[in-house]
Image (cartoon, grey):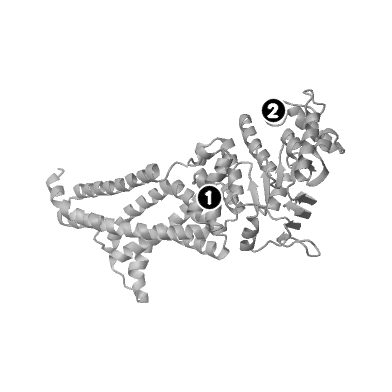
Amino acid sequence: MVILRVEHLSKSFGTTPVLNDVSLIVEKGEILIIIGPSGSGKTTLLRCIHCLEFPDRGTIVLDDVAFGAGDGPDRRWRPDPPRVLDAKRRRVGFVFQRFNLFANLTALDNVSIGPRRVLGVATTPARARAAALLDRLGLAEHAGKLPSQLSGGQQQRVAIARALSMDPALMLFDEPTSALDPELVDEVLTTMRELARSGMTMVVVTHELDFAREVGDRVIFMDAGRIVEEGRPADVFSAPREERTRAFLRRLLRIGAPHRPATSIESPRGRAHGETELTTDAAADRRA
Amino acid sequence: MFDFALIVQSIPFLLRGAVYTVQVSVLAIVFGLVLGWLLGLAAVSGVPALSAVSWAYVQFIRGTPLLIQIFLIYFGLPAVGINLPAFWSGVIALGLNSGGFQAEIVRAGIESIDRGQTEAARSIGMSRFKTLVFILVPQTIRRVLPPLTNELITLTKSSSLLSAIAALELTHAGQLIIARTFASFEIYAAVAIIYLALVAVLSRGSAFLEKRVFVNY
């Protein structure tokens, strides 16, 4: 079942085109990974899906409900009225690169404020549910702390809990580990892995290729505002069809994913291929 | 030379003036705070008409001398049938004036909050209004406390201008004594010290709020 359909999305900042006729679909329960060099439009694509930016043209349909109206003859985007947009947006969770936890609220209140102030849940049940969410993510002992008292990894996990508090049908991750110290990356990836296992539909912009290979059902490579290549992570990473994809992966593997030493496509550690087979099978099983 | 006895004698009368000053200032501060926040929020509301009104108001207030604003209210308004006593003219003039300056402080404070805070609030479906009320304003209050304190101190001291409309506040009380005794140095020194004490109370209050009431975020 298709949960998200994006069609012919285009956007420019001034005269600079950022997205150029991008179309994609996401199935329910699917983990879609988006990779690409910086400036390729992947973050803008994610922000457009959440209407943090408005596209110039195109359509975005979530669960058969269109965001805005971009289906006229010229496909020009017309935003929803604010209230309508607020209501539609609740169904999508967004995890930011820089966490953006509410600085004036404790972890617990960060996770309970959405249900309380947006959904009108009473304080006590909202707090109880927030506490349960934090507990599930291993953050129970930090519930009373302010964001400034938490490590980056903890902040990002609280941010994930905050997004989950609204019961989203789809979670969007915008480079969720890029702003983290290397030793804090794994705790966030573990949380995301568990989320994926629970059947959540996720679109993840990331440079973490190991994670992408292990968890991703499908990967999209973007460059210059277009989708250049698309396929199973195992196929795209080990045998990219497009020269641009090859160049990007070579560069990324030479430098190493942000937090770990370089592995290469040939995989001197000799683990990438074997693991890939296993995990894609696992992903297939999960969907079945 | 320096007549301490005269100062001691004058203290009761000066303190009566100080009470008047405190009364005018406190009422003007309350009025100014309400007006300042309303105008500041209007400026960032995203509603063009509201931000235009706020902008025009700020331009007028900071473009004209406070003394003229006081005269407009005390001497000018009677021409349209509004007669206000010196006390209330003072409260209104100081409040209107301070509100204009506070509006700019509030606007700048809200705009200084990281955009990510707004985006995160919108991302969980909060409206612009709720984002302001629950996320931006609480963070702004602590951030604008120091400049806002400055502004409230300025307001308190500016109340001395009300001597020009013969309001019986601290400065005017001093002038009345000087008119009888010609002891300018002694009396103005005493007046200055009383202002200093009033301002010290404001400063301590603000420091308390900053350290104890609004936690460090």
Q: Is residue B62 left or right of residue B26?
A: right
Amino acid residing under circle 1: Ser
Q: Position of residue B79 (x, y in %)?
A: 36, 75
Residue at horizontal 27 percent and vertical 56 percent from the top = B21
Question: What is the quadrant of residue A79 in the picture?
Answer: bottom right
Q: Position of residue A173 (x, y in %)?
A: 67, 44
Q: Do we see residue A264 in this rendering?
A: yes
Q: Position of residue A170 (x, y in %)?
A: 68, 50
Q: Do we see residue B110 in this rendering?
A: no
Which chain's residue wears label 1? A
Would you place residue A205 above or below residue A15 in this image? above
Q: In the rendered structure, find residue A112 and report the number of the disc placed on it.
A: 1
Q: Which residue is mark 2?
A: A260
Would you place residue B25 above or below residue A184 in this image? below
Q: Nearer the viewer, residue B73 or A266?
A: A266
Mark 2 is surrounded, within 10 Å at the Cα level, by few (under 14), some (14 to 19) or many (20 or more) other residues, namely few
